[in-house]
Image: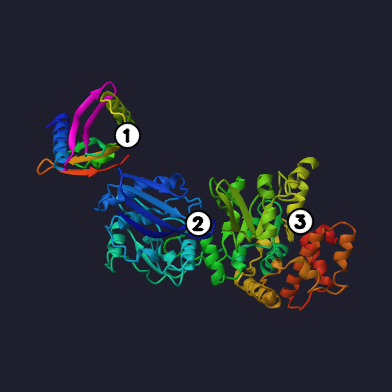
Amino acid sequence: MDANELGRFGEQIAADFLVRQGMVVLSRNWRCRQGELDLVAADGRRLVVCEVKTRSGTGFGHPAEAVTRHKIGRIRQLTRCWLAEHRVRWCEVRFDVLSVHCPPDGEPQVEHLTGVF
Amino acid sequence: MGLAQSWSVALSGVDGVPVEIEAHVGLGLPGLALVGLPDAALHESKERVRAAVLNSEETWPNRRTTLALSPATLPKGGASYDLALACAVLAADRAVPDNGLLRRTALLGELALDGRLRPVPGVLPALLAARRAGLASAVVPVSTLAEAALVAGIEVFGASRLRDVLAWLRGSTSVLVRPGEPDPVRQPAVPDLADVIGQAEARWALEVAAAGGHHLLLTGPPGTGKTMLARRLVGLLPELTIDEALEVTGIHSVAGRLSPSAPLLTTPPLVSPHHSASLASLVGGGSGLARPGAISLAHRGVLFLDEVAEFSPYALEALRTPLEDGEVRISRTEGVVRYPARFQLVMAANPCPCAPARDVDCICTGHARRRYQARLSGPLLDRVDVRVRMLPTNAAELADAAPAESTAVVRERVLQARARAAQRWSGHGWRTNAEVPGSALRRTFRLARAAVRPIDQALREGRLTARGADRCLRLAWTLADLAGRTQPDDHLVWAALGLRDPQVAA
């Protein structure tokens, strides 16, 4: 499994995880000129924008540590684009990080960090 | 989600301030924030602590972690908080129990990336502060354990790895090292006074200086034994009392120059900086918070400035206030530090740049001679009680087989004189004649009119300053102590004037 496949696999697991939590996934891999949002979901009251990080091991650190200050800024910018394109006037937004740990031999584990930035 | 506290100590000069370290592990992206005015070295401890924890087979909390060092307004620096930071994080993450042990233990030590504990300077003053703050125990790097064990009334443990400290916090009692019997204090070998040939007057001056704690200037041609004499002065001085020894050891601990096996300094230190010494190395300095200089390392001991005319004038003039106050206060960006600096100054100099064996052979111009001697300023010389002009050793003295008086003999006389002085001043808190303020000499311990006549005369004729007069009185008291008299008479005052400045007495 190369890095791209691992990333897509992780996103699939993350999406299933959110659905199991009772959320509705609105967009997956939504793209615009500035970049891509991994998952946009709704939990009934508010919009949940998720960044999915998948790692096969922790040798390079915890998956969530890879969400840098720069990336946070870009996700906020992309969220504004998403809201504009979907003509959402106003709604509450929460930013989550889903870290998916896929060990080569074993079940993937999902960790859900809510409202982190 | 958790909160935990641990304790460490910040040092400002030789005074310690207990620092409470709080760790909070809470919601958010993984990250570590360190607050409480850390300097660059302390900021880097984030990386050291994390690596050390991971390499000690512990898990680092993958949550938002905040570390706060309190009092928050006190600037903190150095690597000595590493151990306390690591323990606080792991306790907040509930990896080690927060069972109160952490809240009554001072933790000191720098962490290596592999979890080893490295020694830090200033353990002795830090533990004195921890004891004052009511902490019951302390964990220090194992190589500083002997130094830590000098502090009575606090239980000290030595650790070599973070892993052992964590095991101790989890309840195993035998993993940390307890201090053993202290090594017998090794007396540094001080050369014997019997090695010095001839120089009866200079030897006498050295004895007087040792008996009263007076400052001393030796001038004379090269090869007459100025340096030899000066290096033998510490051998004549009494051993430090236990309080003095702790005070001196504390200063040397802050400077990071204690021997790990036998740290307690019991003999007066001899510090002899090279004449290229800078102002900062002499009085103390450095960026951020000042570190102790040579004059503080010579506290309760001897500061020997060889070839004093070669020192930079700025460095020498900076000695003037510490000589009077017995301490030095240095301001830097992060605050003012006070270091004790009650030292005995011994200076040695040549009379002129060419410095021939016999003074008549001098080829220097009068101007060059004067300029050389002017490098020692009047105000500084005024603070020196005993000034001796040394003469070349002659052939008869060299051939004389009879050994000169040894250190042991002279020391006995010095100790007796010091005992007399200490008894006389005991009600006032002074120990040597040099410490007695001038007002006390002129009022409480006033001498007979006839006895002080030589001083009055010199004052009237402008050959002596008011400070010089006080210093003459102190010197006269020392001469009386050495002679076994209860009070100096006019002969001893004359002799004191002569020792101070031969030209004034003439």
Asked whether, in this view, residue B164 is left or right of residue A23, the answer is right
Secondary structure under tag 2 reads strand
The residue where tag 1 is placed is: A72
Q: Cβ–Cβ below 8 Å for labels 1 and 3?
A: no
State which mark lies toward you, 3 or 2: 2
Q: Is residue B183 above or below residue B69?
A: below
Q: Residue at left 70%, top 64%?
A: B214
Give the residue type that dot 2 points to: Leu
- In percent of width and height, residue A34 lies at 29, 23
Give the residue type that dot 3 points to: Asp
Q: Quadrant of residue B391?
A: bottom right
Please, which colouring scheme is shown? rainbow
- Of B245 and B413, the residue lying toward us: B245
The residue where tag 2 is placed is: B11
Q: Which residues are magenta?
A: A21-42
- In percent of width and height, residue B429 lies at 67, 73
The residue where tag 3 is placed is: B382
